[in-house]
Image (tube, grey):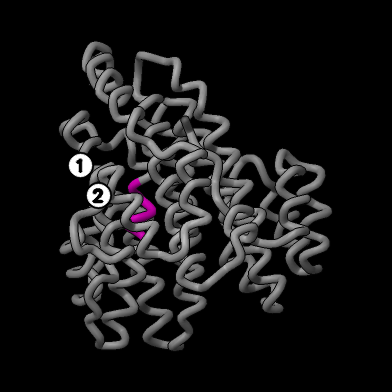
Amino acid sequence: MAENDYVYAVARIRAQEMKLLSASFLEQMIPLPDEEACLRLLAEKGWGSPGQDAGAMLSEEHKKTWDLMAELTGRHMEIFDVFRLENDYHNLKAAVKSTCSDQQIEGIYVEAGTVPLERIRAAASGNDFSGLPGRMASAGEEAMDTLLKTGDGQVCDCILDRAALEDICEAGRKSGEKILEEYGEMRCASGDIRIAVRCARTGKDRTFLERAVADCRSLSRQQLIDAAAAGVEAICTYLSHTDYADAAAELEKSMSAFEKWCDDSLIRRVRPELYDSFGPGPLAAYILARESEIRSVRIILSGKRNAMPEQAIRERVRETYV
């Protein structure tokens, strides 16, 4: 996009930022008596459509974000592939598993990927992934072959999850935009840490770890694998000597505390985009802001549905962009 096109797009985003949920609004939701009361309050803010349940409402809000980006950028959506690739790999995983189980389950796919959903489903159903781009094609073929031969869904997941992280990281670097590169790197590193912790807790061997952990610049892949093979405490010790030292302290508390740290760190990094009027940075920051507030709303609604104490919900709610 030309620079003057971004000026117009950023002006539109500034108007949309006025509609983002504030910390005080989320705090207002937490003491409400139940999920229905929360949905009514969200409806007053323009969320969802009449009669929608929570899941449909959150899906619609996600779609609204990407519809806006498509409107603002036209055919230049590739600048945001670093965000959209995760949707592709989610759909690829769902398509491979649906095909192998011979079950077609509705509602398991998401929109706003870089590859049309029907192309992904056709690749899986025909066991021909040549029509998918690069790493996605090879990972899809390997995952399908593994699942058909072994029936091991965990190995299938780790193949696709690693490919997703590496594609996201690469897309960030190729974008030429600092904010997108930082997002890609942090998404890959945090994904690797999650994988390492899960493997350590479930006693996965080094062979599994070698297959599951992706390459990224801010972590030593081999040192993380070595730490995961030794246990969660060793992972925290390793991280304490990296850029993710603060994350290690949260990880020692719980995985949910670590995930909150990751999301909040991203919001803090992109907040300066509130004062930028040029380039794709403010648009990227808005996407992250929307994803973060949707995640917070999901946490609150889930907490109400499961009768969680208010303080437990409050501890999980993410920082807001505005």
Q: Is residue 85 magenta?
A: yes
Quadrant of the frame with the N terminus? top left
Residue 67 disc label: 1
Identity, as a three-letter code, of the amino acid under mark 1 = Asp
Residue at 66% x, 71% y is 199
State the image coordinates of residue 113 (x, y, percent, origin top left). 27, 51
Residue at 55% x, 51% y is 317
In the image: residue 3, left or right of residue 252: left
Looking at the rendered structure, the secondary structure element under dot 1 is helix
In the image: residue 158, left or right of residue 41: right
- Among all residues in the image, which is located at the extreme top? 4
Is 270 above or below relative to 63?
above
Q: Residue 268's image quarter?
A: top right
Residue 63 disc label: 2
State the image coordinates of residue 19 (x, y, percent, origin top left). 33, 34
Is 72 above or below relative to 240?
above
What is the CA distance from the residue labelled 1 to the residue labelled 2?
6 Å
Q: Are marks 1 and 2 in contact (CB under 8 Å)?
A: yes
Residue 143 disc label: none
Task: In this rendered view, identify the residue nearer to me: 300 or 247.
Answer: 300
Identity, as a three-letter code, of the amino acid under mark 2 = Lys
Can residue 27 be seen from the camera position used here? yes
Residue at 46% x, 88% y is 150
Task: In this rendered view, identify the residue nearer to me: 79 or 286.
Answer: 286
Q: Residues within 10 Å of mark 2 (few under 14, many from 20)?
A: some
Can residue 259 be seen from the camera position used here? no
Residue at 40% x, 71% y is 142
Task: In this rendered view, identify the residue nearer to me: 185 or 221.
Answer: 185
State the image coordinates of residue 47 (x, y, percent, origin top left). 28, 48
The magenta segment is 84-89
Q: Main secondary structure of the magenta part?
A: helix
Q: Is residue 20 magenta?
A: no
